[in-house]
Structures are given as structure tokens and as C-alpha cells.
Amino acid sequence: MTAKLWGGNYETAPDRAFWEFGASFPFDRRLLGEEIAASRAYALALGECGAIPHADARRLDEGLALVLERAKTVPGYLDELDVEDVHSFVETRLGEIVGELAGQGHLARSRNEQTVTALRMFVRAACDRAAAALSGLVEALCDKGEEGAEAVMPGFTHVRAAEPITFGFWASALAWGFARDRQRFQDARRRANVLPLGSGALAGTPLPLDRARLAAELGFEAVSPNALDAVSDRDFAAEFAFACAQAQTRLSRLSEELIWHSGPEYGFYRLPDAYTTGSSLMPQKKNPDALELLRGKAARVQAAVQRLLVMQKGLPAGYQKDLQEDKEAVFDAADALLGSLPVATGVVAGLVLDRDTMRRAASREELYAASLAVVLAREGLPFRQAHHVVGELVVAAQALKRPLRDIARERLRAQHPAVAARIDTIFDPAEAVRAKATEGGTAPETVRASLSAARASVRR
């Protein structure tokens, strides 16, 4: 095995099985760019504070830049060394370029602070990518919602048709949910964007490092106020994973509705062919595999949150090797969500609405029972009594196998003639959605205003 960053007080090498069991380079190599960026900034900071000569700091900086360049351009460069972690890899490769000076880049620096610094940088960038991708999905929902702002369809409660809404109203609901998910990533980014570098192993550094300047050079908004907390803290990782899980869960809910409503049993819209697959046996099938995968990936992202929380349960203060388990959970959550969002955006953008089918489904007369009860109440009948009256009308229509509107017109004519005269308007799908024109309602102009506000919220 390649030389370790420790071991001066050991007489024997680590057990091979244990070495392989504990090595994190197979997965933390993903942090190579972040590790080198932080190491370059630290090397220059050592020169600035007089801990090492400026010339040495520059040589370290140039050497680290060369390591990164070779990692990107030289085949096999990342696979040739048997190293413990990404930090060992960088120092070993740096030593090939600058010799023993490579060790000075770790003057008063611990892997405890290195690993959390690199992970914070990864999470910060992933938050930015997630927020940008969520903005794209919200924009797609708003575009499609404006297209269907007047396309009447059933709204559902308890997976039963309940009241008429519009496709635009439904799209607006999803747009606002994903806009909140975007805000979660913006919030999580602020808490992740705190620099731990300069914390040492747990007690701080004896060097007069300008941590504020170091933070500014690496794009951090603040420095950690306590070294012990800084090397132990994985709140930001769990928070990031939760933001991923919440967004992926919403994608799962979106997928569920799209799967059902695009199927022949509903037929409200057609999915774009580019996001479906065929059957190996049944030639007629176009399966919603993209949506099913979006739904399925919610399980693995939710599991990442649990992994991070359980990992931290019972840990004493200070760095513990358990914390090595943080990275794969973070990577898995990020990969699943960042892979899912462009797919969901493409599906939404490619939906083809079937307005006639949606309108027919929204014309089922029981969907207008609540509106009829409200109209009766506004004519003076106490609402609970109006609710009971309409319930009896529904029972009568079902028993007689006649249209609810006809039964209502006949039986309300004597005591509520004004309501009976308006029955056709009350049962008209377009009029029903226009009637709910208060903010947040189904009226097309209200829906367009809501969509416009959702779009504006992700452009800030």
C-alpha cells in the first residue's frame, strides 16, 4: 500500500482487509476538485501568515494545480495508487512534483477539517445545481399551466373526483411546491457555506491564519466559530439530504398523478414518447418508465436522510470515523435528484393535453354538489341545512337514475326558484371554475396570476 499520512508510531502495516474496509478513496475521489481548491487556498494562506516562505507556497499552489490537470487528462492517473482517501492521494501525487515540500501543505492541518471542508464545497455546488434545475421545472409547469389555464378537469380528494378545477390550477399547485423546494436548497446552502478550514483536528490552529480571507477566497460566507463543532458538524449534510428527499418525494407525487391521468382509464393527456418505453411482448404498450423511476428513486433519497441521521446518533464531540459514511449518502441523494429533475422537466414540457376528455370527466354532475350547496346558502338557507338538502338530491338522482341537475331544478323550483333558474350555470364546468376568482382559486385569470407569481419567485 502507498505511504500513509500517519504511522510513525506503528511497527506493522494495517491488516489488508481492514485497510480495504476503511479506505474511502473509491468514493471520496469525487471530492478531488474541492480538496485541491481548498489545499491551494490553504497553501497560499500559509505563505501569507509567514508559516512557510512565499516561494514554497507558490510551488505548492502550482503543484496542486498540476495534480488536478493530470487527474483530468492522464488516463489511469486516479487508479494507480493504493491510497486511503482523497487527501492521501493529493499529497502523494503532490510529492511526486514538489518532493518533501508536499508535507508542508499540511502544516497544522488535519484531515478532520479537510474532509468537512471539501464536503461543504460539494454540497454548496449541489444546492446551486438543484435550485437551477428546480427553476427549470417550475418554468415548465408554468408554461404548460398557462397553456391549460382554461382546460377544465376534475380535482380529486381521497382519489375520488371532487370538484372541477383546471389543468393550469393543478400545474400551479405543483409549481408552488417545487418553488418551496428550491427555497430549501437556498436556505441549506447558507448553512453549508461556512468554512471549517483552520479548525485543526478539533482545537483550532496555532498559526495566525487569516480565516476570513481564506473563506472569501473559497467563496464561503463565514468561518466556523468553534473548531470542535466544525469538525463534528454534519447538520448541513443531513439538511441537504432532506431538501433532496422533499423534492424527490414531490417528484414521486407528480409522477403518480401523471401515470394515472395519462393512462387510457383517464386519458387527460399524452406523455411524450421520448420519456416512455415499449414492451418486449405487447406491441401496443407505451410504458411510463421515466415516471416510475422518478417515483422509485424517492425511496433511495429518503433513505439517505435516515443514513445521515442514524450515523450521527450517539456520536461524542469531535471527529469519529463513523463520519466517513456521510459522503456516499450525500452523493446518492444528489445524484438521484439531479438526475431526476431534467427528466421530470422534459415530461412536463412534452405533455399533450386532451381538453375534450378532461372536460367530459369534469362534467360528472356530482362534482357540482358543493357549488349548489353554496348557492343555496347564499340565497339564505343555513349552509349545514343546504348541505343536507343537496345530499338528499344526490340520493334521489342516484335512485331514479336521472341527472342531478334535472332533479335539482324540479325539486328546488318551489322554494328556491332563483336557484332553480340558475341550475345550468351552476352545472357548467367553465362557469364553475370562473366562480372561484379569489386569490388561490380556479378562475383562469386567477390561475394565470398564480403561475406568473410562481415563475417570478424562481427568477429571484
Image (cartoon, rainbow, N blue to C red):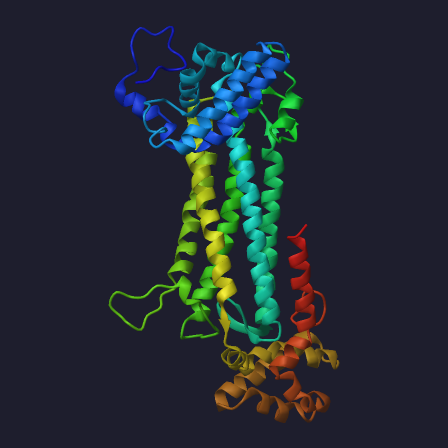
Left or right, 275 with respect to 162, comes to left
Q: Is residue 291 visible?
A: yes
- The answer to whether 460 is drawn above or below residue 62 in the figure is below
What residue occupies the far left of the structure in this picture? 281
Left or right, 446 with respect to 198, comes to right
Give the image quarter of residue 359.
bottom right
Please give the name of the residue rendered at 56% of the width and 87% of the height, measured from the top-left corner: 404
Residue 7 lies, in percent from the top left, at 37, 10
Q: Is residue 372 visible?
A: no
- The answer to whether 236 is drawn above or below residue 339 in the figure is above
- The answer to whether 385 is drawn above or below residue 331 in the figure is below
Please give the name of the residue rendered at 67% of the width and 93% of the height, measured from the top-left corner: 413
Q: For the N terminus, which image quadrant?
A: top left
Residue 341 lies, in percent from the top left, at 49, 53
Give the image quarter of residue 171.
bottom right
Residue 415 lies, in percent from the top left, at 70, 90
Left or right, 89 with respect to 117, comes to left
Please name whichever residue, 220 or 436, is drawn nearer the observer in this view of the structure. Answer: 220
Please name whichever residue, 25 or 188, is drawn nearer the observer in this view of the structure. Answer: 25
Residue 260 lies, in percent from the top left, at 43, 68
Please name whichever residue, 423 or 245, is drawn nearer the observer in this view of the structure. Answer: 245
Give the image quarter of residue 217.
top right
Q: How many marks?
A: 0
